[in-house]
Image (cartoon, rainbow, N blue to C red):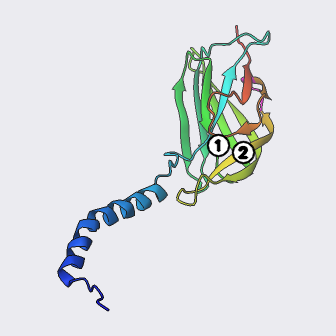
Amino acid sequence: MNKYIPKKENLKTKRAMLMPLYIFVSLLFVTACSGVDCPLDSLVYTQYQLLKSDGQADTLRDTLTITTTKVNGMDSVLLNRLTNTTEFSLPISYTSPQDIFYFYMTDTFGIVRSDIVTITKEDHPHFESVDCSPSYFHTITSVTCTNNNIDSIVIIHPEVNYDTSLKHFNIYFKHRN
């Protein structure tokens, strides 16, 4: 009964030859588990398009500045002196049930008129992966505004997510002669 007992040198040589394979397979598993494409910015934006009463695109002639008040009580300028556009976008808060925006319109004579736009919404947590921080999508339930410069705002697509091609609001500004 002659049993073959491998020499220690042969085992070391075989292990040494297989070591690169072990390392490669280990790296393959590690990188496969962490290859998640998390969004770089978890903010979502509402898209506004400016329309005339006849449904045609409207171009903003006056200067528009939009601000909001943050949770910490500080004011934040979201759009500064926007003009000559037919659309714009605004970020929406993560988990506040309402967003309040202050629209300041400055006409060519330097007269400033303001409106307050209040958006009420439901927030829905959205998870890409456990490796990513959660983001929030929203369902807009209502919008109200004062009527100094703004004639009306209409919700056209209430679901707010990463899709920036969708317009969420039609906004109709009053025209001054």
Amino acid carrying mark 1 in the image: Ile
The residue located at (58%, 45%) in the rendering is 43
Q: CA distance from mark 1 to mark 2?
A: 9 Å
Q: Is residue 9 left or right of residue 123?
A: left
Q: Residues within 10 Å of mark 1 (few under 14, many from 20)?
A: many
Report which quarter residue 164 is drawn in: top right
Residue 26 covered by magenta stretch: no
Q: Position of residue 22 (x, y in %)?
A: 33, 66
Q: Work out whether mark 1 precedes mark 2 in sequence or the reverse, and give the earlier one.
A: 1
Q: Is residue 139 left or right of residue 162?
A: right
Q: Which mark is residue 92?
A: 1
Labels 1 and 2 touching (C-beta < 8 A) = yes
Q: Which mark is residue 26?
A: none
In this rendered view, identify the residue nearer to me: 84 or 36. 36
Question: Pointer 2: what residue?
Answer: 138
Residue 149 covered by magenta stretch: yes
Compared with 153, 123 (above or below) is below
Residue 136 showing in the rendered view: yes
